[in-house]
Image (cartoon, rainbow, N blue to C red):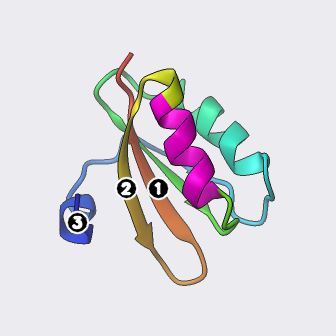
């Protein structure tokens, strides 16, 4: 998905993991995905560079859809659609 597509995605919940180092953002993603329904999108804020590989890998491993990332000012916004 492009940034334009991601900017129009409806977000069901946001987990803010800014300021937390690995594995903090991943733990926030795990908690956050449980707060959204199947088919809904979780947005995760993180300024830990490891999140750029950790979150997509985790999402794929557990069966969710990683939609992509948008760089914001000083942090990244990651988008995951709950699939199960």
Mark 3 and mark 2 lie on one chain; the one further toward the N terminus is 3
Whether residue 63 sits left or right of residue 61 in the image: it is left
Marks 3,2: beta carbons within 8 A: no
Determine crowd level at label 3: few under 14, some 14-19, many 20+ residues with C-alpha closer than 10 A. few
Mark 3 and mark 1 lie on one chain; the one further toward the N terminus is 3
- Where, quadrant-wise, is the C terminus in this rendering? top left
**Which picture quadrant has residue 38?**
top left
Residue position marked by numbered label 3 in the rendering? 2
Secondary structure beneath dot 3 equals loop
Whether residue 64 sits left or right of residue 33 in the image: it is left
- Where, quadrant-wise, is the N terminus in this rendering? bottom left
Residue 21 lies, in percent from the top left, at 81, 58
Secondary structure beneath dot 2 equals strand
Marks 1,2: beta carbons within 8 A: yes
Give the magenta-colored segment's residue range.
51-60
Report the disc number at residue 78.
Answer: 1
Residue 11 lies, in percent from the top left, at 34, 47
Q: Main secondary structure of the magenta part?
A: helix
Marks 3,1: beta carbons within 8 A: no
């Amino acid at each position: 998905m492009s940034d334009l597509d991601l900017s129009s995605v409806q977000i069901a919940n946001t987990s803010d993991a800014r300021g937390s180092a690995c594995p903090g953002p991943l733990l926030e993603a795990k908690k956050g995905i449980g707060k959204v329904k199947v088919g809904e999108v979780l947005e995760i804020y993180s300024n830990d560079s490891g999140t750029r590989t950790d979150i997509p890998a985790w999402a794929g491993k557990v069966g969710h859809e990683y939609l992509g990332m948008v760089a914001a000012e000083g942090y990244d916004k990651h988008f995951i659609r709950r699939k199960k």
